[in-house]
Image (cartoon, grey):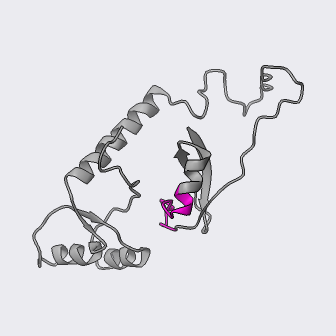
Amino acid sequence: MKVFNLACEHGHAFEGWFASGDDFESQQARGLMRCPSCDSAVVHKLPAAPHLNFNNSPEPRAPQRTAAAPSATTPAPAELTPAQAEARALVLQTLHKLITESEDVGERFAEVARKIHYGEDEQRSIRGVASVEERHALEDEGIDIISFPVPGGIKETLQ
């Protein structure tokens, strides 16, 4: 599992988890990555600091203890604490429920949301795709929406 620090063209920083570096490149080439804050498709990797072993010893040296240094009990970035694992599971369960209990209206999201809001269509939960401009227009009209990125394929299996 590769974890990359990413940012969009507007400077929104976020984290991306990928099966491999090639998986990141493939998703980027196919335009599958989007900023969770502004939905921009212009996403790039931020520089990462690698571990450099300058003393040729097989084991990394322990970091010097300072007030800002993490304690020995702090998990490695790729490991999850039990609380983090529980929070992640709850988020995935909630996302799964939102997806399975709503109708996918695709690109017609803004149109259908307006019809439901103004009583021209039956009241129901919907999901779909809307541009940043469409989302702002819906909010300006007083139509409550929630925006969140959904990885492709999440409809099938959530782990």
Q: Is residue 142 above or below residue 146?
A: below
In the rendering, at what x and y percent does residue 29 appear? 56, 62
Q: Is residue 62 above or below residue 106?
A: above
At a point 81% along the width and 34% down the height, the residue shown is: 52
Q: Is residue 135 left or right of residue 69?
A: left
Q: Nearer the viewer, residue 29 or 59?
A: 29
At a point 59% along the width and 55% down the height, the residue shown is: 25
> Which quarter of the rendered picture does the N terminus lie within?
top right
Residue 77 in sight: yes
Q: Is residue 55 left or right of residue 58?
A: right
> Which quarter of the rendered picture does the C terminus lie within?
top left
Q: What are the residue bounds of the magenta stretch?
A: 27-40
Q: Quadrant of residue 136?
A: bottom left
At a point 49% along the width and 67% down the height, the residue shown is: 38
Q: Is residue 158 above or below residue 132?
A: above
Report the label total. 0
At a point 51% along the width and 30% down the height, the residue shown is: 80
In the rendering, at what x and y percent does residue 53 appear? 83, 30
In the rendering, at what x and y percent does residue 16 appear? 54, 49
Residue 124 among those drawn in magenta: no
Q: Quadrant of residue 126?
A: bottom left
Which SS type dominates the magenta stretch? loop
Q: Is residue 1 left or right of residue 112?
A: right
Residue 32 among those drawn in magenta: yes
In the rendering, at what x and y percent does residue 20 appear? 58, 43
Q: Quadrant of residue 85?
A: top left
Residue 14 in sight: no
Pick out the residue farthest to the right.
55
Q: Is residue 32 above or below residue 120?
A: above
